[in-house]
Image (tube, helix red, strand yellow):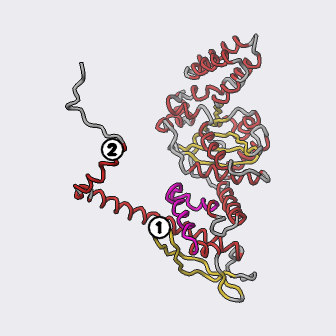
Amino acid sequence: MKESTQNKPRVLNKAHAKRQAPPLITAHPEAVLPMLEMLENARLCLDDLLGDLSRGFIEELLMLSARTVAGEKHPGRQEGAVRWHGRQGGVVTVGQAKLRVQRPRLRDVSGEVAIPAYAAMQADEGISRRVADTLACNVSTRKYARVVRRCAEEVGISKSAVSRQFVKQSAQALAKLMDRDFSQVDLVAIYVDGIIVAKHHIIAAVGVDATGRKHVLGLVPGSSENAKVAKDLLNSLSDRGVDMNVPRLWVIDGAKALRSAIEQCCGEAAKVQRCRIHKLRNVTERLPKGKADQARWIMTQAFKLDATRGMAKLKGLAKQLQAQHPDAAASVLEGLNEMFTINALGVEGELARCLASTNIIESPNSVVRRVSGRVTNYKDASMAMRWTAAGFLEAEKSFRRVRGHAQIKTLIKTLRPSKSELKAA
């Protein structure tokens, strides 16, 4: 039986709709007036926003361009053939609008010296249009200054000038990061893990406070397998207000040197949780595909049990692997007690998943890799440190509280029982 089409809505294809649209608008112009008014108002709002962004962006460009001509600005000192001579108002064209900006003035013995970027933006409307497009398409309000590299060649700013500015700013950011004071922050857990940037090893530490908020604590150059480097990191934290005698959880990748440094600096106050993701990787990479999948499943199930039953299950797995894969069996048993520290502390649910691995550091590491990947030639470890610091500080802007943070109070009570609770125990 043929289906009736009497009550079915008619579907227009794109070509037909395009042919029908003009007659409809012509016949009923009043229908599109509200839409047109909304569109015009939205355009005004967008222009206002773009104007605010453009002003700061262009003034940054003009300052960098002036530095390529006159060098760095030294207050109270006048040197060189071209000298700084205050600031004055100026006008540039951005898209369809003219924008008032503050531009630096330069002078030499013959008079006023032009700023290449300002001259270029006044002479070529296409450059201003590209600046506007850059701001509108792919730059947020807190990142607009970083696209100076894109426009460098177009507006007369040398790449070396931009590089010098980044070196200066990133060095200041690293120094500020390593000078942070944590004497007033109650750090309940500290994650320590390493990252490799262009063959340079760097150790990073991120802390979680009593409210579940994350803090980038510091960076040191070197490997977590280096005892001196590990101690340098812990001593740096101690110097900046982290009391090593306060009981807290340390989540680490399993490096023996790092574990030893924590034991020496913190003693019994440190409760160490080995990263389970690292452990799974260490075990399964020593097994063929089929057995690796089975071992991963057994270990994952064991981690969900209480400490006693979980360790017993993993000991059983090691016994099964011992005959044909002794290296995998040894990896299962290595640091076994510290695989279940959070279980022994009664941590469960979302918080347990956050405290069972160093993923909190892995997330900023991915930002570091993305940011540092733009560099093709790292000159030394200090350069790698600066770029790593820039990546971590960028990631920190998006930090959220750890999942399950409501359970941290319970963890604190377990880690730091009161005197009455100790007597009762």
Taking the magenta stretch, the answer to whether it contains residue 132 is yes
Q: Earlier in the sequence, mark 2 or mark 1?
A: 2
Side (left or right) of 229 relative to 99: right
Side (left or right) of 348 relative to 255: left
Check disc 2 and report its element: helix, strand or loop: helix
Nearer to us: label 2 or label 1 = 2
Check disc 1 and report its element: helix, strand or loop: helix
Q: Residue at x 67, y 58 (%)?
A: 170
| Type of amino acid at the residue the image marks with label 1 | Gly
Taking the magenta stretch, the answer to whether it contains residue 56 is no
**Residue 238 against residue 9 in the figure, above or below:** below
Asked whether the beta carbons under mark 2 and mark 1 sit within 8 Å of each other, the answer is no
> At which x and y percent is residue 397?
55, 51
> At which x and y percent is residue 382?
76, 54
Read off the residue under disc 1: 51
Q: Residue furthest left?
A: 6
**Residue 324 against residue 217 in the figure, above or below:** above
**Residue 233 against residue 324 in the figure, above or below:** below
Read off the residue under disc 2: 16
Q: Residue at x 53, y 30 (%)?
A: 347
Comparing 248 with 132, the one in front is: 132
Residue bounds of the magenta highlight: 123-149
